[in-house]
Image (spheres, grey):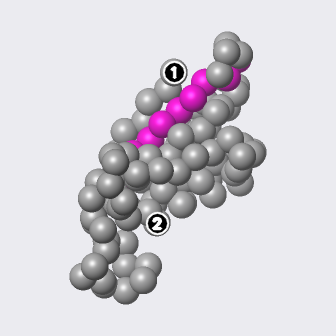
Amino acid sequence: MSDDSVKTMWAAFATREAADRAVEHLVQQCGIARANIFVEASGGDNTVGTEPSGGDGIRADAPLQGEITVSADIADADVLGAERAFREAGARNVLAR
């Protein structure tokens, strides 16, 4: 984004469950619009994370091909709260630009 008052933040998660929790925290605690939050595999392969979360039971066919990345466009005033939300959800790394 070209607006200097907005930063894009990224965080990596080991499970899809943790990534989904981060999305909910960003929406509910920080008031970030869902349209400004994006969830994708960190790499090029389809993945549910690096470890099973157990949401669908223990499955031998779950694609554990890499981390899940959640990114969001965050107003400068909300950056600290968003970082806290990412970390409370289990983020492994949090970056902002």
Q: Is residue 7 highlighted in magenta?
A: yes
* Nearer to the camera, 39 or 95: 39
* Residue lying at 38% horizontally and 64% vertically, measured from the top left: 48
Instruction: Look at label 1 and name its amino acid.
Output: Arg
List x then y, in percent, for residue 90: 41, 53
Q: Are marks 2 and 1 in contact (CB under 8 Å)?
A: no
Image side of residue 21 versus residue 54, left or right: right
Q: Give the residues drawn in magenta, as a range.
A: 5-13
* Residue lying at 67% horizontally and 15% vertically, measured from the top left: 2
Residue 29: tell me if it is visible: no
Q: Main secondary structure of the magenta part?
A: strand
Image side of residue 5 versus residue 97, left or right: right
Instruction: Look at label 2 and name its amino acid.
Output: Glu
- Mark 2 sits on what residue? 17
Query: Considering only vertical position in the picture, is 65 above or below 26?
Result: below
Neighbours of disc 1 within 10 Å: few (<14), some (14-19), many (20+):
few
CA separation in Å, label 2 and label 1: 25 Å
Q: Is residue 87 highlighted in magenta?
A: no
